[in-house]
Amino acid sequence: MKKIGPLLFLLLSLQNIQAQDLDYFLELNQHSTLGDARYTSMSGAGIALSGSMTALALNPALAGLYRQQSYGMDVGGFSRNYYDRDDLFLRGTVNRPNIMNFGWVGKDPQSPLRLFFVYNTDQVYGRKFKLQQSGANSMQLPIIAMANGTPPEFLADNLGPYEDMLYQSYAVDYDPDTKEYFSTADLTDVDYTHELFRKGMRNRFVLGLALAQSPQWYFGGSLSIVSSNETVEIDHRETYNTYTDLNYFSAAENWTNTSLGISGNVGAYYRPFQFLRFAAALELPQLHGFNLDWETTFSATRPSISSSAMSAQGYGEAYQWGIVTAPKIHSGATLVAGRLGLLTVSHTFIPHNWTMSTGKNERYLAEIIDTTIAAQHQLSAGTEWRLGPVILRGGGMWSPAYREGQEATIGYSFGLGVRSEQTTFQMGWQRRVQKSQYYPFSKDYSTPFIFQQSTANFIVGLSWKI
């Protein structure tokens, strides 16, 4: 077993940047896709809408509208399915229950200030694939191409863990005359199974203050502590249809990425008329500090070599790095039809090219984002109508594609509430569909797996006022 230094993560990310790592960075840039039942049932259109604890985390000025001390708590289930886009064959499913939201808004009758606290599950990271293919290229091909020209004793120092481990596991041999690595199997005619399992979540803890400046103007600010964690497991196995010695190869990879970040929000809410409201909020960039732990094992089966020598393992020591996410600019408007109902719309703008690293080893990320990722827009609309004690809600959202290989995200939602004096029981359901791609660790980095991702959330909650 040999240790790989801090350069490990850089090399790993460069080799696989189109697969998981870039996805993770972009998910850190997303605003809340989960939340309380009201926010969920209106497709996240909450920038200019009071009555949602999740909305307070995005626009703190909304807390100024509360006339009573209020509490809320929501729990729910998260479900995500992955389908092959060509035939909609189910490739993987992720399900998990979760506490989505809880919060509190205080009120001093003698003061125009409102203090509030909100916890919110912003994101759930879930991805599960099981891919199988015959007659494909081996995952070894690009690693061999990178290693060629470098003697074995310099692989780890000059190139990285994959090239060195491939040789140390006896999967390939070295020709000192040509300075090239070669396999005893045909690496262009491979049957493989590739499994990916990724899980994690992003949580936000918000403490804020709002000011009711006048019946028309409200302002607010908040401080956020954001925690994020993800665990990725990859199990890759391949056999060869034509071989002289090597007949089996496998790669197992596990890595855990955790971070703690800090950010802030400022917001404003304007009510020029009783039936019309406008709002805007700025979510400042999040400064994240990360801890990364990574481990991988390559194993080969060659009848001519002792089985005790045919595996190599590499792992990175505790590695710290940092990133500053892009800011988010929120805006929205609401039309109110008295006590009968309302219609609200929200827009979020995320300039991804503002993302930057605080460490020199990851500064390559800025160039990749600048050249491959466009700014992101998300539009949401929601409505609710009151029929006595029953409240009916619905909504929709749309976010055009902002990276190659990805299509627009489309979502729709509905929900209801039952109000009794100072207590309201609420339910919300939302579904989002997006078509995207994944570059398996096992292919030639040019033929992605094209999939359709379907995410559904079902949330139930209770809110009450004192």
Image: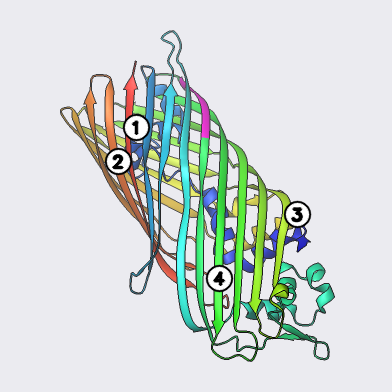
Instruction: Kindly state the secondary structure of the residue where label 3 is placed.
Output: helix
The residue positioned 51% from the left and 39% from the top of the image is 203
Q: What's the amino acid at mark 1?
A: Arg
Q: Quadrant of residue 341?
A: top left
Q: Which residue is mark 1?
A: 277
Can you give x and y, in whole percent of width and height, for residue 217 in the image? 42, 24
The numbered mark at residue 428 is 2
Q: Which residue is mark 4?
A: 236
Q: Magenta segment: does it hold 454?
A: no
Ranked by sequence position, the earlier of labels 3 and 4 is 4
Badge 4: few (under 14), some or many (20 or more) residues near its Cα, within 10 Å?
many
The residue positioned 54% from the left and 54% from the top of the image is 26
Q: Quadrant of the C terminus?
A: top left
Relative to 117, 293 lies left or right: right
Instruction: Kindly state the secondary structure of the residue where label 2 is placed.
Output: strand
Can you give x and y, in whole percent of width and height, for residue 366 in the image? 65, 57
Q: Which residue is mark 3?
A: 360
Q: Please say whether residue 275 is visible from this viewpoint.
A: no
**Foreground mark, 3 or 2?**
2
Ranked by sequence position, the earlier of labels 4 and 1 is 4
Q: Quadrant of residue 344?
A: top left
Viewer-side residue, 32 vs 349: 32
Q: CA distance from mark 1 to mark 3?
A: 45 Å
Residue 66 higher or lower than 226, as above or below: above
